[in-house]
């Protein structure tokens, strides 16, 4: 079984591996989505992390009917990419309707790394205001912020100066740990989060490199690792960092490998082991500074 860890100060002990709802795509039928979701029960996951935009809204819509049978088993999180008050409120209401629940455990401001968008979202008529009102009305319990790109940890530090978010989400993997500036910011952020009991979620644990015009053989926007041994090492490396969570890959065909690796993580692989994978797989960073795809 996958180990559990207190999800910040929410009072919930989440499995250290969280289901990333991006694995449920726009074209998925309910039957296809149910087969993916049943893996969560099989592996004992108790935390779902989706977003209004995943699968063009289909992720929430397919999780919804399934939640009717499993709501009390899961901490349920979603995200809004809207930046102003009115649109964010509408996004929250739509998410509640699609997910077929009375409340969300966590609403997150999705990929809040652009400075202009940051000012709007955290301003007097921004998305954060809508999230706070939804919390006051009992429609959400906690509020988080997420980010992509090399700028994510710096922006999260800035966000935490403005508002006491309950969780953050950002990329973390072996290659990023070798980016000196990113790693320094990441560890500053995780130290602050540990001090304030803020949950830290990580994404892109098995990212290999950008597609760069090659034929896509997975549904992720980046090329992922696919071989069992590589995935196992990458997941073990990630989970060897205390106090952080791993959000699963956005490809349903690879999901079971990630969950199996998370169920039986080994000790942290050495740099030599990880560098061997980097060289063999031609691994590269997948983000630019702004968070866009390379």
Image (spheres, rainbow, N blue to C red):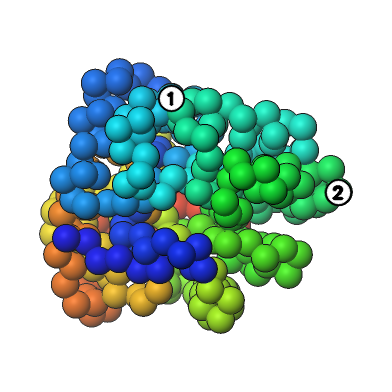
The answer to whether the residue labelled 2 contacts the one labelled 1, judged by CB atoms less than 8 Å apart, is no
Q: Which quarter of the rendering shows the N terminus?
A: bottom left
| Among the 4 quarters of the image, the one containing residue 79 | top right
Q: Is residue 291 left or right of residue 217?
A: right
Within 10 Å of disc 1 (Cα), the crowding (few <14, some 14-19, many 20+) is: many
Task: Let me know if residue 263 appears in the view.
Answer: yes
Residue located 49% across and 25% down the image: 98
Secondary structure under badge 2? loop
Q: Position of residue 270 (x, y in %)?
A: 23, 79
* Relative image position of residue 291 (x, y in whole percent): 57, 51
Residue shown at 27%/51% (left/top)? Answer: 45
Q: Which residue is mark 2?
A: 124
Q: Is residue 24 visible?
A: no
- The structure residue drawn at horizontal position 19% and vertical position 77%, both measured from the top left corner, is 267
Q: Nearer the viewer, residue 198 or 265?
A: 198
Residue 108 spot, x, y in % from top left = 58, 48
Residue 205 got which mark?
none
Q: Which callout, 2 or 1, points at the residue further toward the start of the chain?
A: 1
Nearest to the observer: residue 269 or residue 244: 244
Q: Secondary structure at mark 1?
A: helix
The x and y percentages for residue 29 are 30, 18
Q: Residue furthest right?
A: 124
Q: Is residue 104 above or below residue 157?
A: above
Q: CA distance from mark 2 to mark 1?
A: 31 Å
Q: Please give left or right for residue 39 compared with residue 109 in the image.
A: left
Q: How many numbered discs, if any?
A: 2
Which mark identifies residue 61?
A: 1
Residue 108 or residue 266, whichever sits in front: 108
Task: Check the image and report above or below for 46 versus 183.
Answer: above
- Name the residue located 21 percent from the left edge and 52 percent from the top edge: 44
Query: Is 219 situated above or below 195?
Result: above
């Amino acid at each position: 079984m996958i180990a559990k860890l207190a999800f910040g100060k929410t009072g919930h002990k989440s499995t250290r591996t969280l289901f990333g709802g991006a694995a449920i795509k726009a074209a998925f039928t309910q039957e296809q989505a149910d087969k993916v979701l049943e893996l969560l029960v099989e592996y004992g996951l108790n935390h779902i992390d989706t977003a209004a935009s995943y699968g063009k809204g289909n992720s929430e819509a397919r999780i919804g009917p399934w939640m009717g049978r499993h709501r009390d088993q899961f901490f349920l999180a979603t995200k809004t990419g809207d930046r102003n008050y009115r649109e964010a409120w509408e996004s929250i209401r739509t998410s509640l309707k699609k997910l077929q629940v009375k409340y969300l455990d966590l609403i997150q401001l999705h990929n809040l790394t652009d400075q202009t968008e940051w000012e709007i979202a955290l301003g007097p008529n921004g998305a954060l205001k809508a999230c706070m009102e939804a919390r006051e009305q009992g429609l959400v319990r906690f509020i988080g912020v997420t980010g992509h790109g090399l700028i994510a940890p710096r922006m999260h530090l800035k966000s935490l100066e403005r508002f006491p978010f309950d969780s953050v989400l950002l990329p973390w993997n072996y290659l990023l740990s070798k980016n000196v500036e990113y790693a320094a910011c990441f560890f500053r952020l995780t130290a602050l989060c540990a001090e304030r009991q803020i949950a830290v979620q990580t994404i892109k644990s098995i990212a290999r490199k950008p597609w760069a015009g090659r034929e896509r053989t997975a549904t992720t926007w980046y090329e992922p690792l696919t071989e069992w041994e590589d995935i196992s090492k990458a997941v073990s490396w990630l989970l060897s960092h205390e106090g952080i969570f791993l959000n699963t890959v956005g490809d349903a065909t690879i999901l079971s490998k990630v969950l199996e690796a998370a169920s039986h993580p080994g000790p942290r692989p050495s740099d030599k082991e990880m560098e061997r994978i980097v060289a063999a797989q031609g691994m590269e960073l997948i983000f630019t500074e702004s968070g866009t795809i390379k």
